[in-house]
Amino acid sequence: MTTSVSTKSEVKQSTGAIINVEGLIKRYKDGTEALKNLTFEVQPGELYGLVGPDGAGKTTALKILAGIMEPTSGKIAVLNSRPSQARRYIGYVPQGAALYPELSVDENLRYEAGMHGVAKKDFEQLRQTYLKDMGLLQFADRLAGQLSGGMKQKLALCCALVTQPKVIFLDEPTTGLDPIARRELWQALAVLGAQGVTAVVATPFLDEAERCHRVALMYDGSVQEIGTPSELKKALGLKRLEIAIKNDRQSIKALAGLTFDASDNIADICPFGDHLEALCKDAARGKEEIGIALSKANIDVVNINETPPNLENVFITKLKSLTDKHVRSVPFQGIREKAKNTVSQAGSANVPLKTENLTKRFGKFTAVDNVNLELHYGEIFGLLGANGAGKTTTIKMLCRLLAPSSGTVTLLGDSSNDRSRELRKKIGYMSQKFTLYDNLTVKENLEFYAGIYEIPFELRQRQIGWVIDACDLEEIKSSLVKNLPLGWKQRIAFGAAVMHDPEIIFLDEPTAGVDPLARRQLWRLIRDFADRGAVVLVTTHYLDEAEFCNRMAFMASSQIVAQGSPQELKAMPEGELFEIKSSDTQAAFQALSEALDHWRVSIFGSNLHVILDNGKAELEQVRSILESAGIIVESIRPIEFSLEDAFIDVVQHQGKRQASRQKSLLKGDASE
């Protein structure tokens, strides 16, 4: 295994590797070179991460490794054979979970097992194991086309695992999965690794890459750096500062427009919803420089913490060194009359979006249950929840695409359920499922939406030009949408939703599948719209980026269970969070995941985060579990909750309370 960070020119092959790739090139008929001298190796049982921006070549590489596509040139071996010859022992989970929607869960599994010659007696045992592990056993008869996005991803993984692979390739397997489902999937991958199955995972989520043994950073068709997460972060050589500011509207608005003087000390700086994050060479000097800038802007600092850098910091810093791309502010020229004082009206009687006891039932099923929200001008509001919590249904009612069963939605002063032509022009909606037209080019799609939103004809090319520039679409504007990766499609859909200058913007998972640098660019644009006075409601499963929101609500079991700023929500959990350093992070993760509730344990970098209800009483149990597994505990310390940990704690405890109430009701019914 690599023991230090390797650059592109230093990558060497190791003996005993189960996957060897050397000088791999893939050139398409149109001359596009997707892979350029791709070189890396993967060891048996390793959980190996491929990260890189959209178009880096990750999907092409996985297709070649899985034996689905032939390379143009280069050497490649999987299980000491050509991939096409080893396919019986290869599992592959493509983007979008390629399933047969007209077949049931069971039928999809049987088809895959039959294609790979799995014996009937083996299949029954494998089916039971994997469907149970993924929480799909009770849905075995349901058609795949009727599953939620998260359940489809889990079924796709089951279909790959039921073939008993020795190597499995996964292309962005957690896109669309909520944090709890993501933890379940990574727990399954850790167990597979312990069983000797090698996994290569392409992911745009850098917090997930922290869970891998090693990570390869791809750019422009080749590997630029390889190392363990801790090695890559150490090699960065920078300190990270998190500066929490006073959570009032004036400070948040000032933060969005804050600029900093050029500094040889500060390598990167990014404003979030209620705090600022900076990477700097000298932490003390960085605190001083940032403190002066905030003081000049009349922004009150609550506290400044120095925290270790993460893989996203590594990724963005490396990309900036490889390309001239950076997070830019692209001025937007409005096309509607909008009073600039709308931002200052926040908190007054002029509330642009409000719900009261909003409820939606489908037959006996309640998808949304008595939701109360109040959103203000100039605010970014996050709606976070597990798959099936009711977020998308809520958004559809807010934009009047779906009529509520009861309760009211007041939109720009209108509480009727009508969706008038004039009201539609004031709303921007980016849906979870693409509304783009595959057989049109990028520019043709934008021209179509410019017409739909009735942008004045003389302004259409100007607005389309802004989308192309702001979302970095110049190189692909003449490409058919169907040929583009997920991340590019997301950027186009975002631009189409906002170019008509709406007053209220609904974004349903806008950055799913988008790489970190492009994700920051989208959030910069979102902040710019909020700063101009728009109301923005966004859903996301990526809890790190939820920090960009000024306020948010946690949704569970169709209800709002918590609301507040990121800082307020982090202080809300009932349990305690501990960081555990051990001699073997992956083995410790597996041991604790098997002994505790799976949602309580997660890998963060080279350490574990463990949520306990009673720290003093349960820590001894944790130590005992690890020591019994032969794992040395180096340290255990209490730490503050991340937003992801807080979300999981609050949602899971709410679920327990709800289950307890239902149990009590059933007992009451029985006694009667």
Image: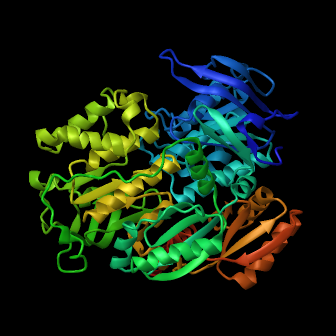
- Which image quarter: residue 44? top right
| Horizontal side, residue 409 vs residue 39: left or right | left
Q: Position of residue 50 (x, y in %)?
A: 64, 41
Count of marks placed on residues:
0
| Horizontal side, residue 76 vs residue 523: left or right | right
Is residue 656 visible in the rendered structure shown here? no
Q: Is 134 in front, or is 433?
A: 433
User: Furthest-top residue in view?
Assistant: 29
Q: Is 647 in front, or is 41?
A: 41
Q: Colour scheme of this structure image?
A: rainbow
| Residue 51 in the image: above or below residue 526 | above
- Which image quarter: residue 419? bottom left
| Residue 22 in the image: above or below residue 161 | above
| Horizontal side, residue 146 vs residue 639: left or right | left
Q: Position of residue 72 (x, y in %)?
A: 63, 16
What residue is rendered at 78% in x and 37% in y?
Answer: 10
Q: Quadrant of the C terminus?
A: bottom left
Q: Position of residue 415 (x, y in %)?
A: 14, 67
Q: Position of residue 350 (x, y in %)?
A: 17, 75
Q: Quadrant of the N terminus?
A: top right
What residue is rendered at 65% in x and 64% in y?
Answer: 281
Is residue 216 visible in the rendered structure shown here? yes
- Which image quarter: residue 252? bottom left
Q: Is 93 in front, or is 228?
A: 228
Q: Is 112 in front, or is 169?
A: 169
What residue is rendered at 49% in x and 69% in y?
Answer: 276
| Residue 115 in the image: above or below residue 464 | above
